[in-house]
Image (tube, coloured by chain):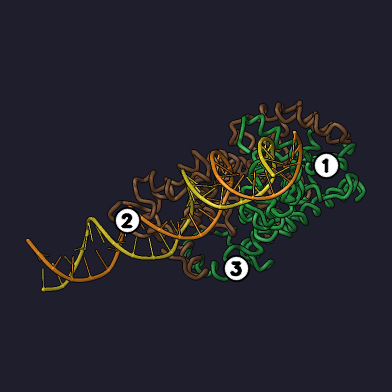
Chain colours: A brown, B green, C orange, D yellow
DNA sequence: ACGGTGTTACGTACGCTGTACGGTAAGTTG
DNA sequence: CAACTTACCGTACAGCGTACGTAACACCGT
């Protein structure tokens, strides 16, 4: 399963995403099974825990056997990603049926937020290009439809969707990081440790605005920031901005 | 340089960020020199290329010598991050002096965009909590000031800033990934390879809206998407949304 | 039923990572 | 000059992705 030219690799990757899988051999391995195993590991212990060895072990198989079905770790991650996005909507019309375009976009944003809660590792995925598999393509169609015919140009439709999805991803990323870090510290524990040290170390800093705002935010949320609040607030700001562009 | 309790480590990290450095020994090593070396490596070859060995080699020093000045890689990255954000504004009043709050936010967004162009690895940094060093703290104060007194609550000020900065980071991330990936392929080369294969593989998909929009966007930008356009467009949408909230 | 052949599975190995440990050598002090 | 302190770093370990070569199996023509 050696690497070839970039073009050949790319073609191979796309065919793989679209279901051109090698047939199972005598161990009964299949691509979907490998993807599922990887997803389970990632859900439970993060993307870093998904090593070829661990996935293979989880399937009761030697590490190198995986390479007969998947060219490497990058393609495995792409398959996992596309599968995850593919489970987002039962039907391509789901967002459209949520109501007007505003309600539809709230639905889309909420669904993506929940997806990132279910699969936080999606936020760690870092592919150089979009993984254009059936799941991602279907998601794009479903999410664009509610924006069709409301007075936006095609380019604006794409930009608005990208803006909203980017906002969701950004909020969800902050949210995921704040839930529990690798030291096992909660947000409050962290802040209780950091706060006094900071006060000591920046005794003679001059921070009139950020000092006041930071204190207010801290009192309001018992933390340095509240991603969930930022998520809903930012979404409404964006929707208002789009509305302004329509009128 | 062994790890201790989480609280002790955290305190140590903050003191390190705020300039409590060990004195240089006989090799002449200093914390700033290590940070600079790491930053140079990251600028040139990405964050993944910053290994303790490479940094040490770049400084003509043994790998383990670094641990006398920096507790580990995480703290090195935090130092690099804070230093990078610290170079963003000459003065804490720079954004305020750009004009009204809208102009100020455009200035802030543009400056951050350019920072991410100069240091793309900042977008790969993944700390569980914000690295609250002098650079980050000063940046927060400078960016909050133009939003003070325009009719937003303290919490809203923080949320608006987070929204804008998140948008910049998201756009810049997409931008950075699209310039050149690890296969050395340009955006156009990638699309020329992917497009025909996709057409072949999803012959019987039903994609009325995304098909049309994708084609328009592709024709407009000669690519699947244009991050720079999304950046400016999204920023204006957000500013309009904030404006609507003020009136 | 059997031997040959092509495919599949996987053991081993290489180069890389972060960093713990302990020895060495340089600088400082008595 | 001798002794002590400490900065430096060579070595080692456990982990990673994956290239390579071999062993075990399934199938097929005879």
Q: Are marks 3 and 1 in contact (CB under 8 Å)?
A: no
Q: Which residue is mark 1?
A: B138
Q: Residue at x 68, y 36 (%)?
A: A227
**Circle 3 residues within 10 Å: few <14, some 14–19, many ≥20:** some
For residue A158, above or below residue B157:
below
Residue C22 in the image: x percent, y percent?
54, 40
Question: Which residue position is annotated with label 2?
Answer: A24
Left or right of residue A112: residue B235:
right
Instruction: Give percent across and percent down for residue B201.
Output: 47, 64
Disc 2 from disc 1: Cα separation: 58 Å
Point out which mark residue A26 bears.
Answer: none
Q: Residue visible at 81% across and 50% down? A: B87
Crowding near pointer 1: few (<14 within 10 Å), some, many (20+)? many
Q: Which of the two residues, A103 or B145, is positioned nearer the viewer here?
A: B145
Label 1 resides on the chain identified as B
Mark nearer the N terminus (3 vs 1): 1
Of all chains, the one bearing label 2 is: A
Quarter of the image that includes the N terminus of chain B? top right
Query: How many discs appear?
Result: 3
Which structural element holds mark 1? helix
> Which numbered tag is attached to residue B185?
3
Task: Check the residue under mark 3 and report the chain it is in.
Answer: B
Residue B144 showing in the rendered view: yes
Q: Callout 2: 10 Å neighbours few (<14), some, many (20+)?
A: few
Q: Is residue B172 above or below residue B129?
A: below
Which quadrant holds residue B173? Answer: bottom right
In the rendering, at what x and y percent does residue C7 appear?
30, 64
Q: Are marks 2 and 1 on the same chain?
A: no
Whole-percent x, y for residue B53 in the image? 61, 53
Q: Between residues B59 and A228, which one lies in front from this camera angle?
A: B59
Report the residue at 71% width, 39% height from top.
B130
């Amino acid at each position: 399963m050696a690497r070839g030219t970039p073009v050949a690799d790319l073609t191979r990757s796309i065919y793989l995403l679209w279901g051109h899988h090698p047939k199972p051999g005598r161990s009964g391995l299949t691509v979907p099974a490998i993807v599922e195993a990887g997803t389970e590991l990632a859900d439970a212990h993060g993307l870093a825990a998904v090593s070829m060895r661990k996935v293979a072990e989880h399937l009761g198989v030697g590490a190198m056997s995986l390479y007969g079905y998947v060219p490497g770790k990058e393609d495995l991650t792409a398959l996992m990603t596309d599968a995850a996005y593919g489970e987002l909507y039962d039907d391509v019309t789901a967002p459209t049926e949520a109501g007007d375009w505003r309600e539809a976009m709230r639905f889309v944003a909420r669904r993506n937020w929940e997806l990132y809660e279910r699969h936080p590792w999606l936020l760690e995925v870092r592919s150089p290009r979009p993984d254009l598999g059936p799941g991602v393509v279907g998601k794009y169609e479903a999410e664009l439809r509610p924006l069709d015919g409301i007075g936006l140009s095609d380019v604006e439709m794409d930009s608005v969707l990208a803006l909203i999805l980017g906002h969701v991803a950004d909020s969800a990323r902050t949210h995921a990081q704040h839930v529990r870090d690798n030291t096992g510290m909660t947000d409050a524990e962290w802040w209780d440790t950091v706060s006094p040290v900071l006060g000591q170390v920046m005794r003679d800093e001059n921070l009139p605005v950020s000092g006041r705002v930071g204190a207010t935010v801290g009192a309001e949320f018992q933390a340095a920031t509240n991603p969930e609040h930022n998520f809903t607030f930012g979404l409404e700001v964006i929707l208002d901005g789009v509305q302004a562009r329509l009128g």
